[in-house]
Image (cartoon, helix red, strand yellow):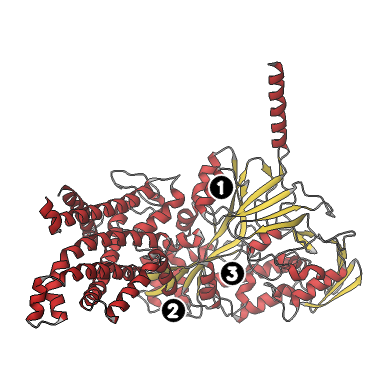
Amino acid sequence: MRSLIFGLALTVMFALGALVSFVWTPYDVTVLEIANKLKPPTADHWFGTDHFGRDIFSMIMVGARTSIAVAIVAVVIGMGLGVPLGLAAAARKGSLLDEVIMRGNDLIFAFPSLLIAILITAIFGPSAVNAIIAIGIFNIPVFARLTRGAALSLWTRDYVLAARVAGKGATRISVEHILPNVANLLIVQGTIQFSLGILAEAALSYVGLGAQPPTPSWGRMLADAQTLIALAPHVALFPGFAILFTVLGLNLAGDGLRDALDPKLRVMR
Amino acid sequence: MTRWILGTVAATALLTGAAIAKTDVTIGLQLEPPHLDPTSAAAGAIDQVLYSNVFEGLMRFASDGSVINGLAEDWDISEDGKTYTFKLHRGVKFHDGTDLDSADVKFSLDRARAEDSVNAQKALFANIASVEAVDPLTVKVTLTAPQGNFLFNMAWGDAVIVAPESIDDIKIKPIGTGAFKFDDWKQGDSITLVKNADYWGDAAKLDKATFKFISEPTAAFGAMMAEDVDAFYSYPAPENLAQFEADPRFTVLAGNTEGETILAMNNKQAPFDNKLVREAVSHAIDRQAIIDGAMFGYGTPIGSHFAPHNPAYIDLTGNSEYDPEKAKALLAEAGMADGFKTTLKLPPPSYARRGGEIIAAQLRAVGIETEISNLEWAQWLEQAFRGKDFGLTIVSHTEPMDIGIYARPDYYFQYDNADLQKLMADFDVEADGAKRTEMLQQAQTIISEDYVNAYLFQLALTSVVNAKLQGIWPDAPTQAIDLTAVSWSE
């Protein structure tokens, strides 16, 4: 329970930062003030300034927006396509449809995700949208597998049998009886995929394939800071910490959610 | 005990002796040559490794950019200025042992100017009517018209003398006449040159030179700090220079390059076909902020496409002073008071990537929105340079005296001005020094007042060099890392 609260607190903090950045940031991140570059943290600039004299605290707030937006949409894509595919595969277990869906998933799983993401953005050009698509595609098999696995065991339950006897079709059973019972698993997985999405977005922007300047992004802030580490370590430290704590928060929240939602664990306690 | 001490002393002496006798050098470079034929590609890295070290031309550039005799011992220009007679040095041998003679010169020049030549600077040879081998050591070059800068042209890396015997393998095994011989190329890692014992001129002081290719600025910093490389030519991360300067092990050479760094505008693409818009862009840009922000202070502001260290340079930065209000007024006059949206394509160097972000912010301040795309060199060459698919782009033009590109309407920024084209054509055949200077100044003024591109700054050449290494050129009059005079001090 403690990890859930701690994790949620971290997550909410970054989410709030991202939301507030829509209406207010301490400084405008699109205005460069070269004369004020690479200043260490002070009362005016809590996290110091970067090589263009931009306020790093403001950039991290706006960067959180980019990271969270990319990760959320990627999770939504993954769930939106993966869950129905998994439900369909489970409903028609052993059929051609099941085989096609699951082997398709295996195919996507077979490639290192970041490599394909780089390929996609290299072909269609680097942008936040392409990064979302690339990360989203890799969430599909994760959710499809999870849903199918969980749904298969549910299909043998008596209440599902009852529903079938009552004449409900496979689609209705999947939606009305299976989906609600796998939902908590999906929420937990969604949290984990969300944190992986943030990492993937940071990695893609780090190599220059994510959100393009001037949109701040944590990964690109790190890349920009790379040659400045000896000169001004704070420029690299703060975006690094931002990524670390967001991912930590989401993972803790995911663990905590699993503890709280998983019926098996609840019985054990 | 005494023996032990003596032994230690002797060993120390040996070790120090070895240190003094260091005769090899490792130079770090960011870009690796695609192949090793300077006469068939524009890639600067080829010349950096090979110019003057392995290949020599009739003429050559000295470290200050002046043109001095190379393989030509002497030359003579006829009364009408159309015939150049070159006298070759006696006893010059290629690295494969064959003699250099007038036939090789004829072969090289004819090859470069041939119809199917792939020379990157064919214009250098365009004026040659014929090349004649009078006797083994005399070559007569006849021009179609008098040309003031013919000797200058012959000093370029694209005009080096190659031999017909070794031309087939030149891309992987270059055979020249220089003070160094090509030894080995570990692709993706390094190129090694060794001393040419039979060199005709002053022998090289080093026995071996290795060019090591390190593209990552962070890796370059590490290699330099660990002294894995003895010098890093054109060090890619200006932000680290202060640290090297403070370190007694290193010297930072800050010199001139021929690199005019410009914000190129696509003169045939709306709205940049409108001079008012180009003028507005030029006034929207604060050069000093770009130099400070992207180059950490290294660089000289320019107002035209011309190097400030050239005697014919005139300061035209006043034409495009930083004045955002004026820029807005000009945009309004052009009917674009609300600004517009365009693309800004950026190749990898930090002057472009960082400079691009600064320029985007400055343009945004006057209402011009830019969509930045960061491109790799290959993509940039394909999309921007060849495809001409860009609104704005930032690039440094590192060829010496390349104002002539403004007379080429098909060049990537697509500037088409008949007056300038005529001026440059006249310039090519003018032999009088004073008149040539005047014409160059006229050309600078025309393109500056036409706001063809926004002229940012002259790229500084910042190399980090081991403090004991002497003789590295601080400036880059051409793309060359001439090692023939480089040596280690005691």
Structural crowding at the residue carrying mark 2, measured as other residues with C-alpha within 10 Å and reported as few (<14), some (14–19) or many (≥20): some
Residue B367 seen: no
Q: Looking at the image, is mark 2 or mark 3 earlier in the sequence?
A: 2
Q: CA distance from mark 2 to mark 3?
A: 23 Å
Q: Amino acid at mark 3?
A: Thr
Numbered mark located on residue B445 in the image: 3
Apparent side of residue B305 relative to residue B477 in the rendered image (left or right) = left
Q: Amino acid at mark 1?
A: Ala
Q: Quadrant of residue B487?
A: top right
Q: CA distance from mark 3 to mark 1?
A: 44 Å
Instruction: Describe the element under mark 2 as helix, strand or loop.
Output: loop
Residue B438: horizontal and vertical position, in percent?
68, 68
Residue A238: horizontal and vertical position, in percent?
33, 49
| Contact flag, marks 3 and 1 (Cβ < 8 Å) | no
Q: Amino acid at mark 2?
A: Pro
Task: Please tell me which residue lies in front, A27 or A10.
Answer: A10
Q: Where is mark 1, residue-wise? A: B223
Q: The C terminus of chain B appears in which quarter of the rendering?
A: top right
Structural crowding at the residue carrying mark 1, measured as other residues with C-alpha within 10 Å and reported as few (<14), some (14–19) or many (≥20): some
